[in-house]
Structures are given as structure tokens and as C-alpha cells.
Amino acid sequence: MAHKSKDSVLKRLTRIEGQVRGLGRMVEEDRYCIDVITQISAVRAALRKVEEELLHDHVGHCVQHAIDSGDKSEQRKKIAELVETLSRTSR
């Protein structure tokens, strides 16, 4: 993973961690259900952004490396990995 991407992902995950702790506090405080659900939606959106950033980094580095290598087997492997991952994440 590129250093810049790694820093960005870690920063986002730290923020998400804080959001999840906040959700726990909201539940402990018996906050209005719709407010909790709204915050859960915000956490999901933040996780999707992390996922997108990781996928972008993977394509830009790992998949690109396989393409540049000229190794057809490695190219097929990386493409299959990517397709499987995208299939899982779209569920």
C-alpha cells in the first residue's frame, strides 16, 4: 500500500472508531432510535470510503504491477481476486 494511502486509511479508520464508540454512548444514553440509525448510516458511508480507497490503491499498485510484469497467470489471478472482492462488497 502506498504510504499516502496508508496514512489516509488509518486516519479514516481512527475517525470511524470514534464514531462507533459514540454509537455505544448513544445506546447507553437511550438516545432516540432514529438518531442512532442515522449515525450507523454515517459509519457505513465512512467504511465504504475506506473500502473505495483501498480498492483504488490495490488497482493502482497490485493490479498494475501484474499488468506491467507481463505474467499472464499473475494478471488473471489479480483480476479474479478483484472481481471476487467486488462481488463480495456489493452484497
Image: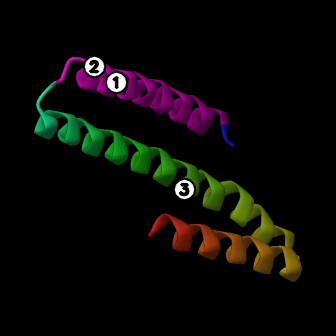
Left or right: residue 76 compared with residue 34 = right
Disc 2 secondary structure class: helix
Looking at the image, which is closer to me, 40 or 55? 40
Disc on the earlier residue, 2 or 3? 2
Q: Is residue 12 magenta?
A: yes
Which residue is depicted at the point 79% across and 68% down?
Answer: 66
Which stretch did the figure color magenta?
Answer: 3-30
Residue drawn at 51 percent across, 32 percent down: 8
Label 2 sits on what residue type?
Glu
Magenta stretch: helix, strand or loop mostly: helix
Q: In front: mark 2 or mark 3?
A: 2
* Residue 45 at x, y percent in the picture: 33, 47
Residue 89, position as x, y percentages in the image: 50, 64
Q: Are marks 3 and 1 in contact (CB under 8 Å)?
A: no
x%, y% of residue 69? 85, 69
Query: CB under 8 Å between callouts 1 and 2?
Result: yes
**Residue beneath label 3, please?**
56
Q: Is residue 72 magenta?
A: no
Way the structure is coloured = rainbow
Q: Residues within 10 Å of mark 2 (few under 14, many from 20)?
A: few
Q: Which residue in the protein does label 2 denote?
A: 28
Number of the label disc, if any, that sits on residue 24:
1
Q: Mark 3 or mark 1, which is nearer to you?
A: 1
Q: Is residue 66 left or right of residue 6?
A: right
Circle 3 residues within 10 Å: few <14, some 14–19, many ≥20: some
Q: CA distance from mark 3 to mark 1?
A: 31 Å
